[in-house]
Image (tube, helix red, strand yellow):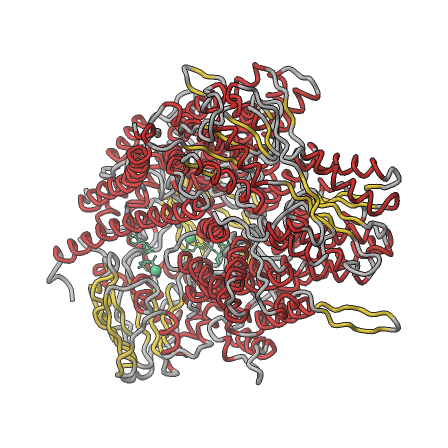
Amino acid sequence: ARAQEAPEHYAMVVFLKGSEFFNWAYAGFQDAAKTVGATTELQGPADWDASAEARAVDQLVAKGVKGIAVTAGDADTLVASINAAMDKSVPVLTFDSDSPKSKRLLFVGTNNFNAGFAAGKAIGEKHGDNARAGISLFPGNDAVNQRIQGFKAGLASVAPGAKVIAEVNDEGDLQKAEQVNTAMLQANPEINVIFCAHGNPATGALAATRNVGRDQGDNKIDVVAWAIDVPILLGVQEGEFTMTVAQNPYMMGVQSFLQLWSAAHPTQFDNMNHPGFGNVPTADLDTGVKILMQGDPAVEALMTPPQL
Amino acid sequence: MPPIIDRQSRAQRSAGQKTALVQYIGLFAITLAILLGTQLFFGNVLTAANLEVLAMNLVFEGIMALGMTFVVISGGIDLSVASVFAFAEILVAKLMVEAGLPVPAAIVITLVTCTGIGALNGFMIVAFRVHPIIITMGTLLTLRGVNLAITDGRSISGFSEGFVFLGSGKVLGINFPIVFFIVTALVLGVLLANHRFFRQLYVIGGGERPARLSGINVNRVKIIIYMLSATLAGAAGIMAAARYGAAHWGHGNLAELKAIAAVAVGGANINGGSGTIGGTVLGVIFLAVVHNAFVTSAVNTFWYDVVSGVMLLVAVLLSRLTQRRNLFAQLRIRQAKMDQIATSTKGESL
Amino acid sequence: MNSSETSMVHRFVSTREALLLLINVAIFAFLAIMRPEAFASWTNLKAVLSLMTYDLLLAMAMTVVLIVRGIDLSVGSVLALTSVTMALLMRDGVPVIPAVFAGLAVALACGLINGLLIAKAGILPFLVTLGMMSVARGLATVLTTGQYISFPRAERWFTQFGRFEFRLQIGDSFYGIPLPLLIVLAVILLFGLLLNNLPLLSRLFYVGESPEAAKLSGIRVDRHLIASYLIAAAFVWFAAVLMTSATRIGYANYGIGAELRALAAAIVGGASISGGSGSIVGTFLGVLMLALIGNGFILMNGNPNWQQATVGIVLIAAVAFDAVRRYRTGW
Amino acid sequence: MLDLRGVTKSFFGNQVLHAVDFNVRAGEVHALIGENGAGKSTLVNIIAGILKRDGGDIMFDGKLVDFGHPLEAMTAGISMVHQELSLVPNISVAENIYLRHEKSNTLGFNDWRAMRRGAAEIFERMGVDIDPAAPVGSLSVGMQQLVEVAKAISLNARLIIMDEPTSSLSEKEIAELFVVVRDLKARGIGIIFISHKLSELFEISDRLTVFRDGQHIATKDIAEITTEDVIQMMVGRHLGDLFPPKASQIGDVVFECTNVSRFGYVRDLTFNLRRGEILGLAGLVGSGRTEAMRAIVNADRRLSGRFKLNDSEVSLSDPFEAMRRGIVYVSEDRKQSGLFLGYDISANIGASTLQHYRNRFGMLSRAALRNKARTYVDTMSIRLPNVLARTIDLSGGNQQKVLLAKALDPQPTVLIVDEPTRGVDVGAKSLIHARLRELAESGVGVVIVSSEMPEVIGMSDRILVFRNGEVTAELDNRSGAVTQEMVMTHATHH
Ligand SMILES: Nc1ncnc2c1ncn2[C@@H]1O[C@H](COP(=O)(O)OP(=O)(O)OP(=O)(O)O)[C@@H](O)[C@H]1O
Ligand SMILES: Nc1ncnc2c1ncn2[C@@H]1O[C@H](COP(=O)(O)OP(=O)(O)OP(=O)(O)O)[C@@H](O)[C@H]1O
Ligand SMILES: [Mg+2]
Ligand SMILES: [Mg+2]
C-alpha cells in the first residue's frame, strides 16, 4: 500500500561501494532523480564480488524499485539477474561496466576499450616507439581487461614499435600495488610507463617510481592513473602523475537515471518530467573520456567530490 | 533409592533442555520481529518475491553452514569452504564448457574432487596435529589462488538449460537451491540427532579422551566430517554457478565467515560438543533477514558491516549468558542438595 | 623469556629459527643469482624491507595474542579504522600529534573491547575478533563512505616521515636508509628483548601455556589477556601511522585479508594456536620469507595470477614440516 | 578365564609393572589391592586394551589375546569401569551406556526409546533410580560411577574391571553396588575389583591379590588372610614408620578462615591453622575439599569468607593476592592446573616468582633461575633426562616434586597441598611426605588434602573430615590414634 504513495524509487548497484568514482556516479544519479522528485539508493559489495551484485539486483526487484542502474563487476555473472528483472518489467541498464549478453536496456558510460585506447594513444604520442609500458591490474574484471586491450591498441595505433613488457597483479590493494610495481620496475628497468588499469594502484605505482628513484628527472617514469580521486588529481596538478584517465561518472549517473526514468514513463517527450524517448529505442550512450594532464581546468573542477 | 540426586538429575535435564529451547525461541522471536517490523514500516517484505530473494540471498552460505555445524560440533572449524565453493563453480564450468562433458558427469567429478579436498583437509588435520584453523586457512589461501590462476581471473559462462535449472529452476514453485537447502537440512538434522555415526561428533567434541576410551576412531570420523563439509560447499558452488550462469573466482568472497557466524548465532559452541542443525538454520535465517531489512529499509548500506558485526557479538554473548544460567541452575540444585543433607543430619557428629 | 624459554628456544624455536634463516638465505641466494642486477640492488632490498614493515607489525600483533592462546582477526580492519580516523582529523585541520594519538586511542579501544569480551565475558577470541573485524571495517567505511581521505593541510613532516631516508655514503655510491624501517626494526628488536626478559611480559607465555596453572601460580590471567590485546592494538596503530604517512591517504579498505597473512607468518614463525609459544625473531623471519617469495615471484616474471597462492602453500609446507619433526622428536 | 603371565610395563623408563602374573576365574570377585601408584590401574588398563604392554602374555578364555584397542577388548567381553570417569558429560545417560553399541536399526538410526528402556531395565536390576534421559554431566560423581557399571553390564561383558568404583560412593551407594556385583557374580561373570578400602574387599571378594611397587606380592583366598596380613604385604613395613613423625611442637595460630562458602560446593568452612602443624582434610571424592581450598585463594569466586593471617585481617581477593600474602595452593591436578607441561623445570619453578630473578637492569636472570632450579633438583632429588627436559617428559612422581618445588619458591607461610601424592610411586611419595613435615617443622602452616586415608592419617596432626562441602568432624591426631574407620564414619552419611 505505502509503496504507491511513496515517491518513485530507483537504485544503483556497484561492485566497489564507496569508491570515489561510483560516488560521483551516484551523485549524478541522485541529482537527476531530485529534478523529478524521485528517490534513490546505492547497493552493492565493496569487494568486487559480482555475485553479491546479482543478489542485490534481485533484492531491489523484489523490493519493487522503478529501475536499476548496475555496473557489472563481471559481465556474465549479472546476466541472469538482469534478465530476470527485465522479465519482471523492472528496467535495468548497465553503466561504466557493461553486461552485453544481458537484456539490459542499454549501456551508459565510457566504452572502456576506447578509454584505454585514448590513454594508449596519448602515451604513444609522448614516447613514440620507445614507450615501454608496465601494467598494474586487478585480474578478472571485464572493464579492466577491455581497458588493457584498448591501451595496447591505442599504443600500437601511433607507435607500432612501443611495447607492453610486464603485467602485475596488485590485488586491488593500495599497499600491495606499491610492492608489486616496485618489483616490476626492478625486474624491468627499461619500463618508462606504468599504466594503471583501475583506480586503486595509482598511488602505489607512483610510490614505486619513487622507490626506484625515477619519480623525477629525465628518466622519470610516466604513471597513467585511472582515477579522479582527490589525491590523484592533486598528483596530476603537481605533475607527479603524467595523466589520469577521466571518465565522466557524474554524467553516467545523470544519464543512467534519465534513461531509467524515461523507460518507466514511456511518453512522448514534451518536458523534463516527460523526457520520454521511452518509446524510441535508445542506443548506448558514450559519456566520453578525457585524458587529464597538468593544468587542465577540469582537474580543479573535480577537486571537490560529492558528499553522500 | 537416593531420591534427592534423582530429582536433581531430572530437574537438571529439564534445565538444560529449557536453556537450549529458550535460546532458539529467542532467536526465532527476534528474527520474526525484524521481519514484521520492516514489513510494517517499509512494506514489500512478506511478499513471495521478497521472501524468495531473502532466502536465495544466503542460501549458499546456508548450505556451507550446515557442513560447518558438523565440523564445529566435532570441535573443529573449516575456513576453506568459500574457496572450495568458488573452486567447484570453476571446475564444473570448465568441465562443461571447456571439456564439453555432459552435465551429470561434470557435477559428479566436481563433487568427488571437492570431497577429495575435504579428505585432504581432514588428513592434514589429524596427521599434522595442528589446529584446524591453520590447515583450513592454508587450503583457503592456496585454493583461492588456484581459482584465480586457472581462470586467469575471467568468468566462465554459457551453460546448458538443464544445468541452469540447478540454480534458478523451481520445484513446486521454490528455487532448487532452497529446496536443496531445506532437504539437506532435514536429512542432516535427522542424521545428526539420531544416527549412530553422527552422534559420535558430540562425544569427540565433548572430549577426545572419553571418545577414544569408548573406542571411537576419532581420526576417521574427523576426516569424514571435513569431507562432508567440503562436499556441501562444492554442491553450493555448483548451484551458484548455475544460479549466476557464470563461474568466477571472486564469487562467495568471505562466505566462510558468514557460515561460521550463522553457526555461532545458532547457539553451537565453537569449542565443540554442542550445536544442532535446527539452531544453524535459525542462525542462517536470522542473518538473511537482517540483511534483507537493510535493503528494504534502504538505510545507508555502509552500516551493514557494523550492524552484522555487533549482531554476531550480541548473539554469542547471549548464548554465553544462557550457558552461565544453565551452570548456575546446576549449582543451585547442588546447593539445595547440600542444605537438604546438612539439615537432615544436624546434631549428628561434631 | 626465562631459562625454560631459552631452553625451548634452544630445543625447538631456535632450530626452527635457524631453519627459517636458512630458507631465507637460500631464497636470497637463489634470487641474487638468477636476477643479480634486479634483486640484489639496494633499491630493491630496501623496497622489500620497508614494504614488509606493515605486514611485520601486524604479524607481531598476531604473535602476541597467539602467545596467550588467542587470535586476532581484526588487525586488518582496525588498521583501516585507525588510519581513517587519523586522516579525517588531519583533513579537518587537527594537528598531527593529537590526530595520531586519537588514532592510538581508537586502536586501543578496539583492543580493549576485544580483551574484555575475551577475558571477562569468556567468549572465544575467534568470534570476538571476527565481530570486531566486521565492525571496525564497517565504521571505517561509514566514516569515509569508502573514499580516499587525503589531508593536504597536515604538517608536511608527517607526510614526509613515512618515506624519510638517511643518505649513507659507502664508497662513492649513496644508500638511502628508510627511517620508518629503522624505527620498526628497533621497536621489534626491543619488544622481542622485553618479551623474553621482562618478567611482566614473559608471564604472557605462562598464561598461554596453561591459563589454569598460571592463575594458581598467582598470575593475573585476565589482565594479561587484555594487556596482550592492547599491545597488539598498539602494533596495529603503529602500522596505520606508517601506512597513512607513506601513502598520504586514509582509506577504509586498507589491510583487507592482512589478518590471514599475519596469522600465516606468525605460525610459520613458530607461534601456535594453542598458545604458550611464539617468537619475535621467528615471526620476523616468517614475514621476510613471504616478502622475499612475493618479490622473487615478480622478478622471475611469474604469472601474476599464481601470486596469491604462494602464502597458503608456504603455510601448509611449514606445518607439514613441523609435524614431521615432531614425530622424529617424538611427541 | 583370564590369565596374565610376566606382564611388564614402564613409563618413561619408570618401570611400573615387573613381570606380573595374575588370573581371574569366571564367577569370582578378584580384589586387587596395593598402595597408590602400585600399578593396579596400569595393569587393568593393559587388560582392557587401553595401554600397550611392553612384554608378557595375556590369555582370555584360553586364547592368547592382544587388544590393540579398547573396542577389541569390549567385543571380546572385557569392559572396564574407569578410575577417572570416562563418561561424556554433554550427552544423556542412556546414550553413554550404549555408546558404540547403540540399539539402532539397520540404517544406523538410534532407537532412543529402546535405549532408554534398556538403561532403565539395567538400573532396575541394579536397584538404582537414575533418569536415563538426564545428561551425565548433571549427575553426582557417585551416580556417574553407577552409570559406568551399568555401561559394563549393558555390554554383557564376561569380565568386568572396576577400578576404585567405591572411592566416591556413599555407604548407601556402595551397598547398592555390592548387590549388583553379587548379582553379576551369580551369573558367572568375572570381576576385578580395585579398592583401597580393606573392609569392602573382605566383604565382597573371593580372592585377593596384593601389588607393591609394580610387583605381584601374593594372591590369597579371602578366607585364609587377615587385614593385618594384607597391610603387611601392601606396605612391606609397618604403617607407623611409613610416615615421618608427628609435629615436635605446635605454635600459635598462623592462619584463620571463617565462614568460607562457595555456592553449590562449600558451606561455612571455618578452621584455623597453627604454626608447625600439618592439618589434614579427609573426605570422599567430591566432598568439596578442593573446592573449599580453591575458594580460600578465591580461584573460583567464593560466596563469603574472612581470613586472618598472623592475627591481621587479609582480603584474599585472588590467587595473586593470596600468593603475595604467602598463602599458596597446590592443585590436585598437576597436568591441567599445576604445571606448565611444555616448559622445563626452571620455568615452572619460576612461574610465581619471576620478579625475584632479575639482574640490575630489571631483566630476567636465567642463570639465577637455573641455579635455583638445580638446588631444588638436589633437595627434592628430582630425576630428569636433562636440565632442559620439558616437565611433560618427567614421570608422575618427578612432576609432583617439581610442582611442590614451584610452590615452595615463593616461601609460603601457609601451604595448601591437594592430593600431594596422587599417582606417585612409593619412593617419591615418602620423600614428599618428609619434605612436607620438614616444612611444618620450619614453622610453615601446612594443609594436606588427600583422598588416601593412610596418607591423611599418617601425615596430619589434626584432621578435618569433609562431607557435602561441610566439616563433619575435627579429629586430633597428635597421638596417631585416629583410625580409617573413625574418618569413614564422618565422611559418609548413613
Ligand atoms: N600415563 C602415565 N605416564 C607416566 N606414568 C604413569 C602413567 N600412568 C601411571 N603412571 C605411573 O605408574 C605408576 C602406577 O600407576 P597406577 O595408576 O597403575 O597406580 P595405581 O595402583 O592405579 O594407583 P591408584 O591407587 O592411585 O590408582 C605410578 O607411579 C604412576 O605415576
Ligand atoms: N555431587 C557432585 N556432582 C557433580 N560433580 C561433583 C559433585 N561433587 C564434586 N563434584 C566435582 O568433582 C570434583 C571433586 O570434587 P572436589 O574436588 O570439590 O572435592 P574433593 O573432596 O577435593 O574431591 P577430590 O578428592 O576429587 O579432590 C570437583 O571438581 C567437583 O566439581
Ligand atoms: Mg589406579
Ligand atoms: Mg580434590
Q: Does residue A144 show up?
A: yes
Q: Quadrant of residue A5?
A: top left
Q: Looking at the image, which is closer to me, D373 or A188?
A: A188
View quadrant of ligand 2: bottom left
Q: Looking at the image, which is closer to me, C123 or C184?
A: C184
Q: Quadrant of residue D159?
A: top left
Residue D310 horizontal/vertical position (percent): 29, 83
Residue B60 horizontal/vertical position (percent): 49, 30
C30 sits to left or right of B146: right
Residue D428 horizontal/vertical position (percent): 48, 67
**In the picture, which quadrant includes the N terminus of chain C?**
bottom right
Residue D403 horizontal/vertical position (percent): 47, 67
Can you say whether D487 is above or below D134 in the image? below
Q: How many marks?
A: 0
Q: Looking at the image, which is closer to me, B340 or D1?
A: B340
C204 sits to left or right of D109: right
Q: Residue at x 63, y 57 (%)?
A: C55
Q: Looking at the image, which is closer to me, A120 or D455?
A: A120
D75 sits to left or right of B79: left
Q: Does residue D398 show up?
A: no
Considering every residue shown, the one lying at the far front of the view is: A270
Q: Residue at x 30, y 47 (%)?
A: B322
Can you say whether B290 is above or below C175 in the image? above
